[in-house]
Amino acid sequence: MTSHFPFRMNTATHPNTETLAIVSLVCSATSVAAGPIGFIPGIICGHIARSRMRRNPSLSGSGFATAGLIIGYAALVIYAGIFFFVLSSVFGPSPLFAPQ
């Protein structure tokens, strides 16, 4: 059977990249500008993507999901530290730790 196209189409199969892995990385990376709006969905999507990739070995993107999780958890620690610093600055030292 001859093809009507003047060129041969490349029909090689490429591994399917899990979309949520890319979403995880993008959301976590935007947490610098978006704050908690960015890293919370990034962490959730990263865990869902890794779970899907464990169930279906034909999916790729493990590096994207892992990077999204690392950046997301790092942002969580940074924003929690900022939150507690601001909270302690506003309310002052606790009377439990005042010198006697």
Image (cartoon, helix red, strand yellow):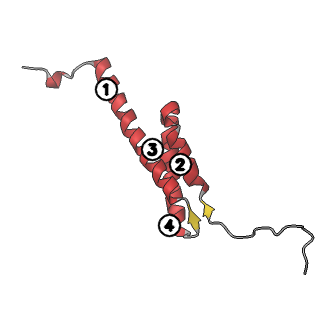
Give the residue furthest to the front. 6
* Circle 2: element type: helix
Residue type highlighted by circle 2: Ser
Q: Earlier in the sequence, mark 2 or mark 3?
A: 2
Residue type highlighted by circle 1: Phe
Report whether 77 appears left or right of 64. left
Give the residue furthest to the bottom. 1
Residue at image position (52%, 36%) is 37
Question: Looking at the picture, how far across and down is residue 40, in whole percent?
Answer: 48, 42
Q: Earlier in the sequence, mark 4 or mark 2?
A: 2
Nearer-the-camera pick, 21 or 88? 21
Say which quarter of the image contains residue 93.
top left
Give the Cα separation between the discs numbered 4 and 2: 16 Å
Identify residue for label 2: 24
Identify residue for label 1: 85
Q: Earlier in the sequence, mark 4 or mark 1?
A: 4
* Circle 1: element type: helix
Tell me the crowding category of disc 4: few under 14, some 14 to 19, or many 20 or more residues within 10 angstroms, Cα based: few
Question: Looking at the picture, how far across and down is residue 38, in whole percent?
Answer: 52, 38
Question: Looking at the picture, how far across and down is residue 72, in whole percent?
Answer: 45, 44
Give the residue furthest to the right. 4
Report whether 81 appears left or right of 5. left
Quarter containing the C terminus:
top left
Residue at image position (39%, 33%) is 79
Q: Earlier in the sequence, mark 1 or mark 3?
A: 3
Are dots 2 and 3 in contact, CB under 8 Å? yes
Q: Is residue 70 above or below residue 62?
A: above
Q: Earlier in the sequence, mark 4 or mark 3?
A: 4
Are dots 4 and 3 in contact, CB under 8 Å? no
Nearer-the-camera pick, 56 or 88? 56
Q: Which mark is residue 54?
A: 4
Identify residue for label 3: 72
